[in-house]
Image (cartoon, rainbow, N blue to C red):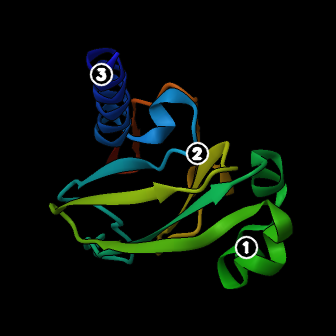
Amino acid sequence: MFVKSRIILLMGLAAVLALSAAGCCTVGIGPCTRTDSITLNGSAQLNACGDDHKSHPVILRFFYLKDARVFNDSAFEETWEDPTAALGGDLEGSYHDVTLAPGANETLALTRPEGATAIGMMINFCAEGDVNSRRYIFPLKKKGLKKTVNLQGINFSVK
């Protein structure tokens, strides 16, 4: 009887240690925190404008979104100036800015909020151009995301 209770105790302890090592979320207990890795590569001709077409750094802004449609339908200038007002309850958490210089590489590690279904990205190029060339949506999937996009001299890789 003593041996049997010891075996049960050891099995219980092993199960607790396994849950601790694996993380409770992997077995459906509690929320999982996901991190999205965004790699940015700027071309040498990034954000070229003006009469001399000289390259300039560009500011990129990343948003976690509950619903990408609101982001897609919002006015660019209003969303850039006041994302909280423009996106309302569809903005998950805060936004993240990064400045990318011509020829530079940057990597971001962003913690994904629980209710996010997409990452919205806005690019503040010096030449305004078409709004659709200044914003992009990366849909998020539960099993992960791996997507590479090239927009006006910037290669983006989201994992």
Q: Say if 150 sits above or below 92 in the image.
A: above
Looking at the image, residue 77 sits to the left or right of residue 4; the answer is: right
Q: Horizontal and vertical percent for residue 86?
A: 82, 73
- Residue situated in front as seen by the camera: 87 or 136: 87
Q: Residue at x 47, y 69 (%)?
A: 125
Dot label at residue 30:
2
Query: For the residues carrying marks 3 and 2, which lies nearer the camera in this image?
Result: 3
Q: Tell me the residue that label 1 is attached to.
A: 79
Q: CA distance from mark 3 to mark 2?
A: 35 Å
Query: In what element is the residue under mark 2?
Result: loop
Is residue 75 among the parts visible in the rendering?
A: yes
- CB of mark 3 within 8 Å of CB of mark 1? no
Q: Residue at x 84, y 66 (%)?
A: 89
- Residue situated in front as seen by the camera: 48 or 108: 108
**Mark with earlier residue (3, 2):** 3
- Residue situated in front as seen by the camera: 102 or 32: 32
Q: Tell me the residue that label 3 is attached to.
A: 2
Looking at the image, residue 140 sits to the left or right of residue 117; the answer is: left
**Mark with earlier residue (3, 1):** 3
Query: For the residues carrying marks 3 and 1, which lies nearer the camera in this image?
Result: 3
Q: Amino acid at mark 1?
A: Thr
Single out the residue that lies furthest toward the bottom: 81
- Residue situated in front as seen by the camera: 35 or 33: 33
Q: Residue at x 38, y 77 (%)?
A: 50
Q: Amino acid at mark 2?
A: Gly
Q: CA distance from mark 3 to mark 1?
A: 68 Å
Q: Residue at x 56, y 72 (%)?
A: 95
